[in-house]
Amino acid sequence: MKKIKNLIKAIWRLSHRSLLELRIYCQFLLSRRGEGPLVLFVVCDDEPGWGSELRSKRVVNYWQNHGKRALFLPSKLLSHQRQRIGRLLKADVVIHQTFVNEKADPRDFPEAINIVDVDDAHFLDARLKQSIIERCLLCDGAVGGSRYTENWLRQHVDKTIMLWTSAPYIHVETASPSSRSKKIIWGTTNPLLTKTEAELVKKIINNCAAKTTFEFIVIGDGSKKEIANFFALGLPKTIKVTHIPRQPYKDFIQILTQGAVGIAPLIVDGDCFNAGKSFGKILAYIAAEVPVVASNAVDHALFFQNGENGFLASEIEEWSDHIVRLLIEPELRDTISASAKKHLQKELSIEAFSTKLYEFVAELYEEKNGVSCCS
């Protein structure tokens, strides 16, 4: 019985992958009226709302809607399927969204211009570093999600560009920031995973508690009791600490709409994983119209201007001063969140990301073929 079940599963997986491949050929036929080179996007995962969607799938949709030829290859496709698609469709350019596993490999597309897109510092993982370098060396171009990642990529790829991850298109019902109750929100992957970061947040919250009352909401993986106890220790009883488990992206943003202030602490100590981060969950704060107070680190200072579209902090007193000011000045929250959304549209929108990426693709294409992308 077990063998029969396993056989059925294998047949289903095979047929499912075949249908995925067939769907790509159908999309190709529909896209033939578009202009420019055929660009394929290869991803390592299909998790909605995060890197593979924000830096790949949504770019494909945007380009298709603007008359460009682009196709998205799901991560469930096998290597021989990717090779066949590239060969049959005569792909001109292939963009690989990270090299964290074998599902993205320039060797699958030997005739195409290969570009790697790295939005996190996975290359610092000793288990992945050599494999990532080997595949980067096969690429004609590279896109870094921050200055740090672009600088690293420049060691292994001749042509590079830095592009911050674009913000999500998610509509949520939200009250104006000024009408929200005094809630500080910290959205993170796992609040207790990095001890130094957790300790920093704890000190910030304690310092704020000495100046005003509020509720602290922390979102992320981990034990509800352990997380609540860690941050509540030493706080006055008037300060409520609430833990919410990590949610699907749209639900995550909906929860954020409760916040009067969103904090984005980031401790960067030399070549650590945090050094490669740029905005990540900050994009969700802005989408939820939550004013942001962020660490004065990585690329934050290139986007945030103190008191205009957010706040930057280095010392505990700076953190608490900015947070408390936002808590007790409701009108300031409206001003800050509106300005942040305006800056986001200019620097972090899908339009900005897709336009800059296409210009980079066009440059590489023209260098190789000696003709304009649109000729």
Image (cartoon, rainbow, N blue to C red):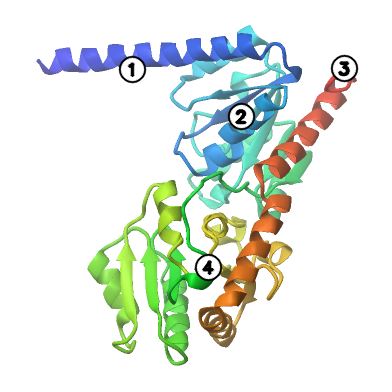
Q: Residue 177's mark?
A: 4
77 lies left or right of 229: right
C-beta proximity under 8 Å, tags 4 and 2: no
Residue at screen point 81% across, 29% down: 362
Q: Secondary structure at mark 2?
A: helix
Dot 1 corresponds to which residue?
13
Q: Nearer the viewer, mark 1 or mark 2?
A: 2
Callout 3 amino acid: Ser
Callout 2 amino acid: Asn
The Cα atoms of the two marked residues, 2 and 3, are separated by: 22 Å
Dot 3 corresponds to which residue?
375
On screen, residue 225 above or below 190: below
Q: Secondary structure at mark 4?
A: helix
On screen, residue 116 above or below 110: below
Residue at screen point 58% across, 72% down: 333
Could you tell me which quadrant the C terminus lies in?
Answer: top right
Q: Residue 61's mark?
A: 2
**Residue 92 pos. (x, y %):** 72, 18
